[in-house]
Every structure is written in structure tokens, then in C-alpha cells.
Image (cartoon, helix red, strand yellow):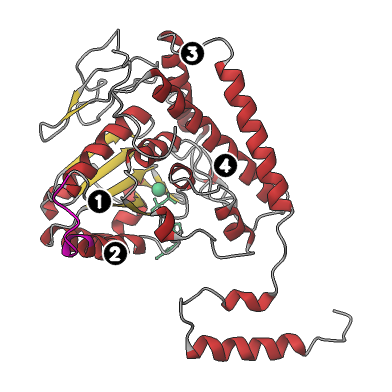
Amino acid sequence: MAKGDPGVSTRSRRAAPRSRKGTGGDPELVQLLTPEGERIDSVVGPDGTVYSVDFTDEEYRGLYRDLVLVRKLDAEATALQRQGELGLWASLLGQEAAQVGSGRALRTQDMAFPTYREHGVLYCRGIDPIMPLGLFRGVDQGGWDPNEFKFNMYTIVIGAQTLHATGYAMGVAMDGKTGTDDGEAVIAYFGDGATSQGDVNESFVWASVFNAPLVFFCQNNQYAISEPLERQTRVPLYRRAAGFGFPGVRVDGNDVLASYAVTRTALDNARHGQGPSLIEAYTYRMGAHTTSDDPTRYRIASEVEAWQAKDPIARMKAFLTKQQIVDADFFAEVDEQARRESLHLRERVLAMPNPEPVTMFDHVYPNGSPLLDEQRAKFSRYMESFEGSAH
Ligand SMILES: Cc1ncc(C[n+]2csc(CCOP(=O)(O)OP(=O)(O)O)c2C)c(N)n1
Ligand SMILES: [Mg+2]
């Protein structure tokens, strides 16, 4: 889908022929597309909000294309790491719908604060997918301009970006940028494990009492490395919001339509001055935590298989096929585009120049720092001490 404002076009919309009202079987889960690819017309959330989407056929196809491309580029990055071309990679496998749905729900003016796994949101923001690979290859510090793309730098310190997002969102409100349809909203991504961090809980308090225009988007992928969800909480995570004084909702994170619907609603509420909310995108990390992790040490194969049956791409494919929204060549054409783009990504990663080691001090602060200047000078002298030697 094109960057901008998908899902609000008034052109030839497709009604959901087998539509029904419901919750997909789980009263606590907002779902608009079942694992079998059946469309649910609208769903009522825990606070009475009605969630639905109204996409054109072209927009449905665009969402599918996004999901496939994001998965393929992610798989290519994992392969590059395995071949020694990246130092590390944090795969999003299984979380494509949570990320594409929420990423496409952002309006151009909205600001996002990611963790280290939001490659799908990054893609939706229109950032070249090569950018995070430079970071994980260790040749630069990310490369994109957060202000240009309204997408902050990746944050590895668990939960820290929720504080940054809260401060940013408070600033947005203080600058008078909320209260209209064109107002600005902020979204902060984090994981289930991060909800146990002090930073995240402090963010909840501050965002709440200052009515910050902020959406807390928790991808509950069931694990914090090897720690399962039951070591983080005894209640569904979305219910914690009530204790902080703002609404919470749990969405099927493997359903791109529902992820879009709840995020767009939460962002619009925030931009209109109605304050923060928490979205718990209930999903599953189908791969390892990172390429340094071996999940077979702590989880059983049948659990992974059960979640494979809820695959976000398979259900969208089933929906497009059942509703005859695609012609015979569509899926092959998308696969071919994904193959081409991942090959292009690979070629560009292999061609990345090795930077001079001293450049690691660049771009840490916008205007430098005396301490860093001192370290740079010391490091330069150290590197010069090798000049003329064999190494
Ligand atoms: C403050 C802090 N503590 C510990 C770590 C090490 N660490 C990296 S990822 C991770 C688990 C995070 O789990 P979760 O928040 O569920 O996110 P996920 O990776 O599952 O998306 C931990 C503990 C860290 N990066 N930062
Ligand atoms: Mg997690």
C-alpha cells in the first residue's frame, strides 16, 4: 500500500459477504479475520467501541503484499546473519500482521518509537529496509532520520523508548498539536517482557496523568527471550491499563485487519485529545528471540505448530482467495516481487563499505561532546600505533 492514509478511501468498497458480528470466539480478543480467512464485519471492544474496517480490494491486496514482503526481507536478514554477514538479527516472524496493521494505521504526522524488532513498521513508514541491516552489521548506527520518517531509532534497552515516547507525546500536547482531525499522535512499541520494567510502568503513570496523545502498543509474543508470559503477569496485559486510568484492548495480533482497526481508533482518540490507551496485540514469536537464541531449549514443537495454524499471511491469503479479490497471477507476482527485493537487499548488504573504526564516534550527539572528543582522540592514537605494522 502507498504511504499515507490507506483504509479510508471511498472507492468501490467490498462488503464482507459472509460477515457477522462477533468476537471470533474469544470475548477478550478483537478479531476481524479468523485463522480460516473468514471476515467478521465488526466487533465490540471491552469499552463498547465498535471496531471494523472498510478497505477497497486494492487496499486488501496491498496489505497482503506488505505482509509477504516484510516476511521475505526478514527471512533474508536471518539468512545473512547465518552466513556471517550480520552480527545479529531479531526476526519478526509471526508478528507481521501486528506490525503492518498498526504501521499502516499511522497517519503521516504520527510519530513511532520502536524496539529492535519493528522492521514491519519501519517498512510501512517508507524507510529503506537496508537501514536496520547496517545497524545489525555494525557498520552504522541505523542511518534513517527519525524526524523525516517520524520513526525513532531502534532501542535495545527494554522499555526505555516508552519514556521517550511519553515525553515526546507530552510535548506534542504542549505544542497544541492535538484536538483536531489533523492532530498528531504518538505510538510506542514494546514487548510482553517489557511490561515488567519500571520504565514502562512509569510511562503509563505519566502518560495517564498528563493525558498524553500516546498509544502503547504491546506485542505480546508470549516470550521475553526464554521467559514465558506467565512469568510477567497473572492477568491479561491489556487489563493493566485500567489501573493506570486509561483504556486497554486486546487484539488478535495475527489479524492485520483488526490490528489496523484498533490502532487507527486509538491513534484518532489520542490525536483528538482523549489521552493514552494500551493495545495488547496477542501474537506469537514463531522464530527465535534473536539469531543468538535457541528456542528448542525452552519451548515445545507442538506449541509452535499450534501457532503456525494461526499464521497471519495464510489467513489473509485464504480471505483474498475465498472472496475472489485476486486473479490467478496475483500470489505468484507478489512472491516474485519479494524474491527480487530480497535479492536486491542481499546485494546491497554485501556491498556495504567497512567504515573507518573511528567513525563510531560520529552521530552519537548532534553537536558532539567533550568527553566523546577525548575518547575519539585517544582511540585515533591507539589506531595510529598500528600503522606500519603487519596488522
Ligand atoms: C533494560 C534491559 N534489560 C535486559 C535486556 C536484555 N534483553 C534483551 S531482549 C529481552 C527480552 C524482551 O522481551 P519482550 O519485551 O517480550 O520483547 P520481545 O523481544 O519478545 O519482542 C531482554 C531481557 C535489555 N536489552 N535491556
Ligand atoms: Mg516478548
Residues at marks 2 and 1, CA–CA distance in whole angstroms: 15 Å
In contact (CB < 8 Å): disc 4 and disc 3: no
Q: Residue at x 41, y 34 (%)?
A: 97
Q: Is residue 214 above or below residue 358?
A: above
Residue 55 on the magenta span = no
Question: Which of the pair 18/36 is nearer the observer?
Answer: 18
Q: Is residue 257 left or right of residue 80?
A: left
User: Mark 3 near mark 1, Cβ–Cβ under 8 Å?
Assistant: no
Q: Secondary structure at mark 1?
A: loop
Which mark is first along the chain, 3 or 4? 4
Magenta region, residue range: 172-180
| Label located before the other in sequence (2 or 3) | 2
In three-dimensional space, the C-alpha distance between marks 1 and 4, rounded to whole angstroms, equals 28 Å
| Circle 4 residues within 10 Å: few <14, some 14–19, many ≥20 | many
- Decide if ligand 1 comes within 8 Å of the CB at mark 3: no
Identify the mark at residue 326; answer none if there is no mark.
3
Q: CA distance from mark 3 to mark 1?
A: 34 Å
| Label 2 crowd (10 A; few <14 / some 14-19 / many >=20) | many
Tag 1 or tag 3, which sits nearer the N-term?
A: 1
- Amino acid type at circle 1 is Ala
Say few, some or many: other residues with alpha carbon within 10 Å of mark 1 (under 14 / 14 to 19 / 20 or more): many
Horizontal placement of 63 versus 213: left or right?
Answer: right
Q: Which residue is mark 1?
A: 185
Residue 237 showing in the rendered view: no
Determine which quarter of the picture holds residue 251.
top left
User: What's under tag 4, amino acid-wise?
Assistant: Asp
